[in-house]
Amino acid sequence: PFLALALAGGLFSGLICYRLLGRPSSPRTILRRALEAKQFEPFLQPIVDARDGGWIGAEVLMRWHLPGEGLIRPDLFIPMAERTGLILPMTRDLMQQVASVLAPHAAELPPRCHIGFNISAAHCHDPQLLGDCRDFLAAFPPGTVELWLELTERELIEPTEDTDLLFQQLDAIGVKVAIDDFGIGHASLNYLQRFTVNALKIDQSFVKRIGADTLSAHLLDTLVELAIRLDIDLVAEGVETAAQRDYLRALNVRYLQGYLFGRPMPIREFLPALHQHRNAVRNTIDHQS
Ligand code: C2E
Ligand code: MG
Ligand code: MG
Ligand code: MG
């Protein structure tokens, strides 16, 4: 908790690091050591089809398993990883871990299993990203997975000719792009013009306000209309209640994600949870017939 607070408050001073590690270390050194010690782990959260609740894939969320401190949430260390540039090797390691666990079980995954990684602004200038995506896809039998990259607007991405080219190349190898936390950032509409966007992830704050006021309802309607006009998919995040699910389903939002369907879980628990979900669905159908 002490380190968590220090990270959150941006008080990551030499003194704090000294107290924690017994020697003065920079944030970069701490994160680099954690990476070498394999302390960053992938957690997976199911993404479901709004129509029937069937799992269509998952979003990969990074966790820092820090001995003695437990699991540290990404909000507390991703900004530091971004500032130090370590987010690039950390994401690469995450992609490799996910591929090595899931690829041997590709046949058990949902068809064209959607696997989404969060990427940072620095990735848009990373010459290795395209190769990392190729490697990820090559680990699976052809056509079994769909790789999604989720771009947030937390940091502004400067579109250049290089980024345009990168996104064309990603598109050419079948990588899909989603705009994360859509609706709360400052560059949303600009992104839509610049990148080939395949999906929008509606920010949780819109889902939270369902039923609360009519302005929010109008905003949601407008987001849905925008997606239809642009012919792109919609994913709603942070779905916690059946009422929210029903509302979004009635609006024709195609995919849903949230605690109602499943919390982020350690990757080793993902396949068992998927099988359990399928069995539960099968039992329901058996009972109905
Ligand atoms: P995000 O990409 O928007 O991810 C969704 C966040 O919402 C996750 O938080 C998830 O655990 C949480 N969430 C999912 N369903 C619900 C729900 O029903 N209710 C509520 N209240 N929350 C829900 P998490 O895992 O703490 O991640 C926070 C953010 O950290 C992510 O937001 C993403 O921006 C960033 N992040 C996580 N992993 C990575 C990564 O590997 N790389 C980068 N660059 N950023 C990451
Ligand atoms: Mg995301
Ligand atoms: Mg989000
Ligand atoms: Mg978020």
Image (cartoon, rainbow, N blue to C red):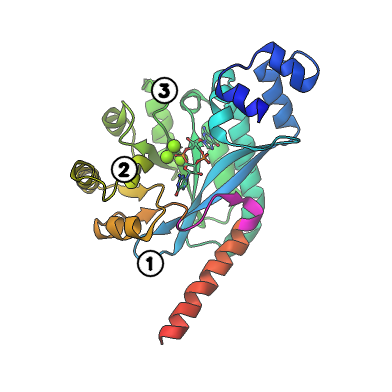
Residue 145 coordinates in the image, percent (x, y): 51, 54
Q: Is residue 244 left or right of residue 26?
A: left
Q: CA distance from mark 3 to mark 2?
A: 33 Å
The residue beneath circle 2 is: 206
Residue 162 coordinates in the image, percent (x, y): 41, 22
Three-letter code, disc 3: Asp
The residue beneath circle 3 is: 162
**Going by the picture, which residue comes out furthest to the right?**
22
The residue beneath circle 1 is: 52
Disc number lying in front (1 or 3): 1
Does residue 66 belong to the magenta stretch? no
Residue at 58% across, 21% down: 85
Q: Which residues are magenta?
A: 260-269
Inspect this view and state whether residue 87 appears.
yes
> Is 189 rendered above or below residue 111?
above
Disc number lying in front (2 or 1): 2
Name the foreground residue: 103 vs 134.
103
Query: Pointer 3: residues within 10 angstroms few (<14), some, or many (20+)?
Result: few
Disc number lying in front (3 or 2): 2
Residue 73 coordinates in the image, percent (x, y): 58, 36
* Quarter placement of the N terminus: top right
Does residue 266 belong to the magenta stretch? yes
